[in-house]
Amino acid sequence: MSDPAPKPSGRATLRLGNRERVRLQTAVILVIIGLLAIALRPLFVRLVEVRDFQTCQTNVRKMAQALGIYAQEWDDTFPLADVWLDAVRGRMAAVDPDRYLKCPKDHSSAPSSYLYNETMAGLSLSVRRDDPESTARRRQLRRLDRAALVIEKHGSAENAHAPLPDWDAVAANMTLPHNMPEATGSIIFGNGRAWFRSREALQSSAGRRF
């Protein structure tokens, strides 16, 4: 006598075909990738900011070298404000010097992402000329070798040059809106040395002469 046939269970079983199984696996993988992208996005953003900061540092060093060469050619005298970008371009050992004049995040039509201190324009570190206007600017700055020559400042058509007679003016220009979340604080001193300060460090120096 044969066994009776088993009674069907009241629970339905879910059976996936090959196509449905592949779709489910693909959906799970996409969800995992999405979660990883969300989790790693701050890291990627930070890496881009570090890259752009280092690019700005490189730009400032290149400009410091170019302005140093110019000064050596002209009795330690810095270029006039209206021609400082041409002076930098002509003394950069690069195929495309203009790329060093712009921050990677500066998409404005400005000629440069950097600001030249027109208070220093035409002054010499070593030669004192008998010129009342130059003498007055020397006294205003006090020490030319410690005065800001070029600072990083983004995004304005007026940023080619401006007077920076003291740290107040430097800090004010460094705290204007920037393309990057934080101003890099890149500065070239009058002696051609590149120096990097945070916004807070510049603000703590504000109110003092150079």
Image: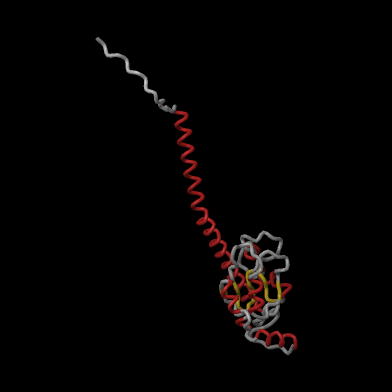
The quadrant in which residue 186 appears is: bottom right
Where residue 74 appears, as percent x and y from the top left, is 67, 80
Name the quadrant of the N terminus.
top left
In the picture as drawn, the residue positioned furthest to the left comes out as: 1
In the picture as drawn, the residue positioned furthest to the top comes out as: 1
Where residue 69 appears, as percent x and y from the top left, is 62, 75
Using the rendered image of the protein, determine whether residue 72 is visible from the camera's viewpoint: no
Against 15, residue 190 (above or below) is below
Against 80, residue 108 (above or below) is above
The total of numbered circles placed on residues is: 0
Task: Name the foreground residue: 156 vs 100.
Answer: 156
Left or right, 4 with reference to 68? left
Left or right, 136 with reference to 206? right
Name the quadrant of the C terminus.
bottom right
Way the structure is coloured: secondary structure
The quadrant in which residue 192 appears is: bottom right
In the picture as drawn, the residue positioned furthest to the front comes out as: 10
Q: Residue at x 32, y 18 (%)?
A: 6
Task: Name the foreground residue: 209 vs 128.
Answer: 209
Task: Name the foreground residue: 107 vs 89.
Answer: 107
Where residue 149 appears, as percent x and y from the top left, is 64, 76
The quadrant in which residue 173 appears is: bottom right
Using the rendered image of the protein, determine whether residue 13 is visible from the camera's viewpoint: yes
Q: Residue at x 39, y 26 (%)?
A: 11
